[in-house]
Amino acid sequence: MNRPIYLDYAATTPVSAEVMDAMIPYFSLHFGNSGSNQHMFGWEAADAVDQARKSIASYFSLKPSSILFTSGATESTNLAILGLLEHQSPGHIISSVLEHKAVLEPLAFLASKGWDITYLKPNELGEINIDQIKAAQKSNTQFVSIMWVNNEIGTINDISTIAQWCSNEGISCHSDATQALGKLDISQAYLPDLLSFSGHKIFGPKGIGALVLKDGIRLHPRQWGGSQERGLRAGTLPVPLIVGLAKAVEGIPQLLTYLPQIQAIKQEFEKALTASLGESMILNSVSENQIPNILNFSIQGIDWERLFRSMPQLAISNGSACNSKSTFPSHVIKALGRDDDTALSTVRISLAHTYLKEDHEWVINYLVQSFQKLLP
């Protein structure tokens, strides 16, 4: 059986050969527990973790102590929001309706504890801007959480400007940067106080991510049972995954070099689909201020339940992998003003450099023909 052509890189990426090669020795030869400080096996593992922490911190121009290893962006985000705020007296939080559930659900929990939360709506381009945040500020605003890049439509928010304003106002700022790494060069950007990301979006392994903390941020642990990660994240460190994450971060500059080619491919998709589908196609990725690898569009008048079953030779999605088992329309697409049927009939094509090896002309023709068969 031939495997489908993959067009869902915003959901996850394969582990690169370089990352795999870096990880393998720590599954077998250097298998020690980094917490075992009485012998060589533990020292080797601890050294590997230290080097990985230094490498990732260097990318962000921060101290190694700024990097906390987690299981991924979801855990990082929960630790950032709840670890910072759950033990504080309730105040005001600013976020947006476009956020990932890893932000929205912890915020909903805080709301049940008395926190006042303002959820900003995007403009017609799907953007959240600094003027909206300034207008939403209250005298007791304590926290702002805005994603750097939206995972469904690819829109970029100006997090550096938001983070700088928050700093000036004495407000803690968090950003989910999961979709930003590898698609934007944020290595020299002004960073928020807390930054979440995952390894598996940048050709690293699943099950590993990090929370980046600026100096002065004090968190409460979300789990107990060990002193690992400054006592904030108990549990034996997954040394192979940590090594793999560092190697993936080291590879980000190379990923950025592919972006012009990826942008050109995306434009070819958009041009061909617009010409074929005409007014039936509603483009959701409309801002010029967006990453090159995500194209999101809805198709009016088609049976959304047949949509993805009709294209078995392509691996595409209708948005966030975290929502894939839900029959509810995407909250992101709904926030753009689409009705339920249109939001459900949405396709997200997400690209990476490995797609450049595929037969692009065949993929476009297959997509066009498949969609045309679904139209009334």
Image (spheres, helix red, strand yellow):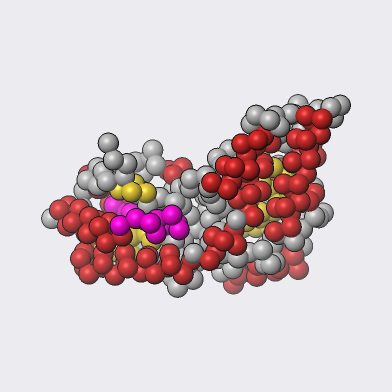
Q: Residue 316 location, x and y as percent?
A: 34, 49
Specify the segment rendered in magenta: 345-359
The total number of labels drawn is: 0
Q: Residue 108 location, x and y as percent?
A: 57, 44
- Asked if residue 16 is among those painted magenta in the image, a careful observer would answer no
> Residue drawn 21% across and 64% down?
277
> Residue drawn 39% across and 59% down?
356
Name the one closer to the observer, 20 or 74.
20
Asked whether, in this view, residue 141 is left or right of residue 342, the answer is: right
> Residue drawn 50% across and 58% down?
150
Q: Quadrant of residue 40?
A: top right
Residue 286 seen = no
Quadrant of the image containing the N terminus: top left
Residue 18 seen = yes
Asked whether, in this view, residue 291 is left or right of residue 375, the answer is: right
Name the one closer to the observer, 122 or 309.
309
Q: Is residue 218 above or below residue 296?
A: above
Q: Quadrant of residue 371?
A: bottom left
Judged from this view, the residue extending furthest toward the left is 376
Q: Residue 44 location, x and y as percent?
A: 78, 35
> Residue drawn 32% across and 54% down?
346
Q: Residue 135 location, x and y as percent?
A: 61, 69
Name the one closer to the observer, 318 or 6.
6
Quadrant of the image containing the C terminus: bottom left
